[in-house]
Structures are given as structure tokens and as C-alpha cells.
Image (cartoon, rainbow, N blue to C red):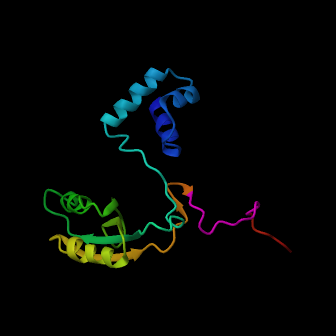
Amino acid sequence: MINQEILELLEKDARLTPKDLSEILNEDEAKVREDIAQMEQDKIICGYHTVINYNKALRYEKTMAFIEVGARPMKDKGYDHTANIIAGYPEVNSMYLITGDHDFICLVEGKTMFEVCQFVSDKIACIEDVQSTKTLFVLKQYKQNGVMTGAGKSDHKDDRLVVSY
């Protein structure tokens, strides 16, 4: 159970040290370090990330798009073969097998819309088992990894809706 608690705490704040975690959980620091190391080795913890508000990072050019991909599963491999090819590109930030009209959804990043479009047409669309793609560009970010990025947030302290009769 302690591993689940460690994961939940680190997911909310990756800057927490093993000492911080041991104090919060009232556990031995050495045990917490050991548990974290084991979870990293087992690829349960796959990295530590910072949430960046790209709406405010004015000098940093970044275009993000969700790419829906329709694919044909391969005999004896299913979707994994195609997914591994697509996920292997550095432009692909995240990728998921999904339900619905398409089989995958990928978060792709590039410097410009043209760069993202070129990546989709030159790389993803050319994969043998890919049957279709649909590109959805991100226009504005409001929330990432559970963190409000500030875009569109009200400056009012009380964000409740006003109800009147």
C-alpha cells in the first residue's frame, strides 16, 4: 500500500524527496528510497516531469496536435507493431490505443503547424498498416496533468456561478 501512496504523492509533486515522502507517510526514509528505486527499475515510475504553461512561454515555439490514427491490426501482433513504430518517433509525446472511430490517439509536437503536418504525411501516413489520420491542433491549453495552466482562469476569487431568481 505504501507504493500506491508514494505514486500518488509523486504524481502530484515530483519534487518531493524520499525524506519528504517518509515524513508524510510516517515511514523509514531508507525503505521509501528502496521502494522508489524498485519502482523505477520495474518501470512503474518512468520519469519525473515538469508541467509547463506554453501559453506564457512566449519565446518558445511549440505546436501541439492530437493525431487520430486508424490502423489495421497485424496477424499475431495486433496493434503493437504499428504502435511501436509510431511511438518511436521523437515528435510523438504520448500515444494511446483507444475506442471509437480511430484506433490510436497521439500527442505530437513540432515548432510549427506545417512541421506537424509534414510529420503526419511523411511518417505516420506512410506506415503500411495505417489506414487514416485526423489531425486536431491544440489552440490553447487550459489544464495539463491535473494542473490548471492559467489560460482562461478567472481573476475573481469566487469562481462560483451567480444564481438569481
Residue that lies at the very extreme toward the front in this rendered image = 59
Residue at 42% of width from left, 69% of height from top? 61
Q: Is residue 42 above or below residue 60?
A: above
Q: Position of residue 130 (x, y in %)?
A: 21, 72
Q: Position of residue 111 (x, y in %)?
A: 36, 71
SS majority, magenta:
loop
Q: Is residue 164 above or below residue 145?
A: below
- Residue 156 colored magenta? yes
Frontmost residue, 20 versus 159: 20
Residue at 33% of width from left, 77% of height from top? 134
User: Which contiguous range is marked in magenta?
Assistant: 148-159
Occupied quadrant, residue 95: bottom left
Q: Position of residue 137 (x, y in %)?
A: 41, 75
Residue at 27% of width from left, 60% of height from top? 90
Is 151 situated left or right of 33 in this image? right
Is 47 situated left or right of 6 in this image? left
